[in-house]
Image (cartoon, rainbow, N blue to C red):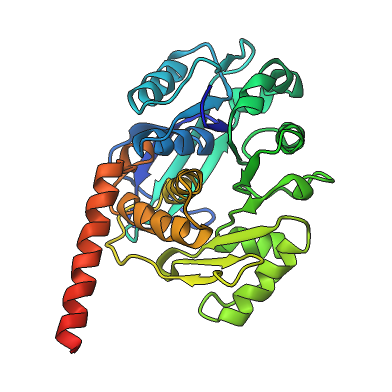
């Protein structure tokens, strides 16, 4: 059985590059259309595989060619795909993504088979949860399934990490009490907390994160793009974790890479702060490339970036002396 289990969505992304994000009623022309494996669950599983993790994914696909695209890509990344469930009444999920000249994206998801995942599917695969060490989930599958799986995982004493995307209008009762780490981005933190905040202001971010922590999860890790990340936990190691400067090409899958990298390093025994610093580095490589799963780095690439960062820091310190 795998050390990390991802329960979540599998999509095939249809990506188009545009000069700017269109506004309501506006028609614009794009560059070529590119079809790429995606979906937050699949992206996170792929990232774990490419980073060398022992990972399996549980999710739903259709009986179509898009499902085979996902299976093959995840297998190539080292992910166990034996537990994907084929839903004959729905196609594999799809996402339509526009990426503007700044690398920012807008995404419309057609859930397809992802919406057909049921609590019965979790029951049939309960052994996967029982035998993993970390469970990672998102919110692109039915929320009762997310809540049910989290409840089972906590019963078995597993570490539960939730990426709350997309943020639903209503969170299932009791879910937060079964989540150990919630990892929103800045938009999701604002939606979950119900407050607007200034990501340049420590107190402002802390207040919003505290509101989420008070709902139940012990740890809140907020990914803040070029500002890095913010950790709110019950230790003295929280606070800001700086970003790794990079040229942004496409932010697709950056958050998924971050979540996966953080989880892997927690499994490897790192502190939460060190795991988040590692995740920032992995995400910085993702945003410098185009695509979802195709942009995710390997462990070798992340290690090389960390080495270069360390050398640059040493040179800067010597120059300062």
| Residue sitting nearer the eye, 266 or 117 | 266
Q: Which quadrant holds residue 243?
A: bottom left
Q: Residue at x 40, y 39 (%)?
A: 47
Q: Is residue 267 above or below residue 188?
A: above
- Disc tally is 0
Q: Residue at x 36, y 35 (%)?
A: 52
Q: Is residue 33 above or below residue 104?
A: above
Q: Is residue 43 above or below residue 60?
A: below
| Residue sitting nearer the eye, 212 or 116 | 212
Judge from the rendering whether residue 175 lies leftward or rightward of residue 15; answer left or right: right
Q: Residue at x 64, y 65 (%)?
A: 233
Q: Residue at x 47, y 53 (%)?
A: 270
Q: Is residue 72 above or below residue 180?
A: above
Residue 74 is at least partly visible in this image: yes
Q: Position of residue 186 (x, y in %)?
A: 56, 64
* Image quarter of the C terminus: bottom left
């Amino acid at each position: 059985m795998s050390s990390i289990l991802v329960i979540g969505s599998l999509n095939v992304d249809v990506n188009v590059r545009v000069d700017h994000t269109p506004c309501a009623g506006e028609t614009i022309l794009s560059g070529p259309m590119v079809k790429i494996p995606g979906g937050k669950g699949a992206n996170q599983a792929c990232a774990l595989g490419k980073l060398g993790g022992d990972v399996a994914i549980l999710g739903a696909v259709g009986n179509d060619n898009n499902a085979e695209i996902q299976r093959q890509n995840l297998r190539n990344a080292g992910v166990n795909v034996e537990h994907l469930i084929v839903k004959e009444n729905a196609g594999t999920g799809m996402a339509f993504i526009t990426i503007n000249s700044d690398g920012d994206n807008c995404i419309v998801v057609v859930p397809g088979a992802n919406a057909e995942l049921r609590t019965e599917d979790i029951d049939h695969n309960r052994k996967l949860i029982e035998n993993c060490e970390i469970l990672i989930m998102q919110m692109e599958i039915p929320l009762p399934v997310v809540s049910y799986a989290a409840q089972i995982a906590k019963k078995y004493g597993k570490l539960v990490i939730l990426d709350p995307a997309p943020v639903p209008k209503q969170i299932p009762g009791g879910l937060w009490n079964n989540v150990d780490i919630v990892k929103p981005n800045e938009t999701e933190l604002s939606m979950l907390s119900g407050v607007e905040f200034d990501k340049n202001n420590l107190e402002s971010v802390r207040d919003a994160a505290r509101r989420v922590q008070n709902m139940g999860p012990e740890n809140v890790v907020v990914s803040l793009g070029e500002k890095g990340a913010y950790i709110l936990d019950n230790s003295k190691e929280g606070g800001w974790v700086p970003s790794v400067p990079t040229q942004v090409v496409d932010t697709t899958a950056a958050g998924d890479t971050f979540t996966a990298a953080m989880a892997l390093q927690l499994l490897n025994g790192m502190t939460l702060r060190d795991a988040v610093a590692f995740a920032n580095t992995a995400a910085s490589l993702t945003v410098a490339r185009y695509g979802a799963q195709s942009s995710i780095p390997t462990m070798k690439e992340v290690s090389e970036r960390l080495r270069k960062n360390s050398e640059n820091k040493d040179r800067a310190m010597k120059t300062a002396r």
